[in-house]
Image (tube, helix red, strand yellow):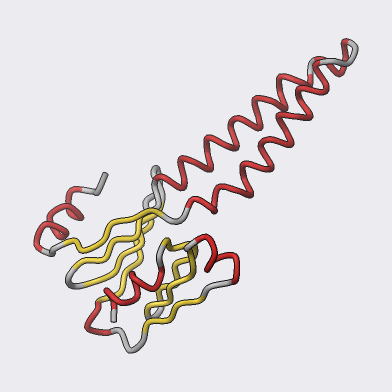
Amino acid sequence: MWPANGVQAMARERIRVDLRRHGVVLLKPFVRSFVLAGAGAFLLALPWPALLLGPLLTGLGATLALAAVWRWDRTRLVVTTDKVVLVQGVLRRRTAGVRLERLQAVEVEQSLLGRVLGYGTVVAGALRVDYVPEPREVAELLG
């Protein structure tokens, strides 16, 4: 999961939290996918020319849902004893991090829906991470 040099660096530090973003990030892509799949299913019931578009829309909907789950699964927030790191991507890995010793303040932003469902945004220095599950607990680890 981690690149070789990342594994060595993480091994020297103690991982305190390793989590994915909240599952609510999948809601919007899933709605889009279900609409496409529903349109595809509707087109399957129509005469021949429209019948060809049905499987294409259904397949596109399934592909979008799979891609959303893949992105969600491959995005990790890791808090170690020394830093907080956001790792994103599969083919093109992007890593952003902030050392804990350099943090001046840690902020938590939560909407009403976020408070009800248990997610929010954590701002740690220059690092802003949306849809963090239990953001207050993560902020306590950072501060």
Q: Position of residue 115 (x, y in %)?
A: 52, 68
Q: Residue at left 48%, top 64%?
A: 119
Residue name at image x 15 percent, y 60 percent: 9
Residue 130, percent from left and from top: 49, 65
Q: Residue at x 69, y 25 (%)?
A: 58
Residue nearest the observer in this picture, 16 or 103: 16
- Vertical comparison of 102 with 128: above or below: below
Q: As displayed, is residue 116 above or below residue 92?
A: below
Provide residue 1's location: percent of width, then percent of height. Answer: 26, 44
Q: Nearer the viewer, residue 115 or 7?
A: 115
> Which residue does the image show at 71% across and 29% down from the upper left?
37
* Residue at the outermost top position: 48
Q: Residue furthest right?
A: 47
Q: Against 98, is 33 above or below?
A: above
- Looking at the picture, does residue 48 appear above or below residue 135? above
Q: Position of residue 41 (x, y in %)?
A: 76, 22
State which quarter of the image contains the C terminus. bottom left
Residue 61's quadrant in the figure?
A: top right
Left or right placement of residue 136 versus residue 39 in this view: left
33 left or right, relative to 92: right
Residue nearest the viewer, comparing 117 with 88 = 117
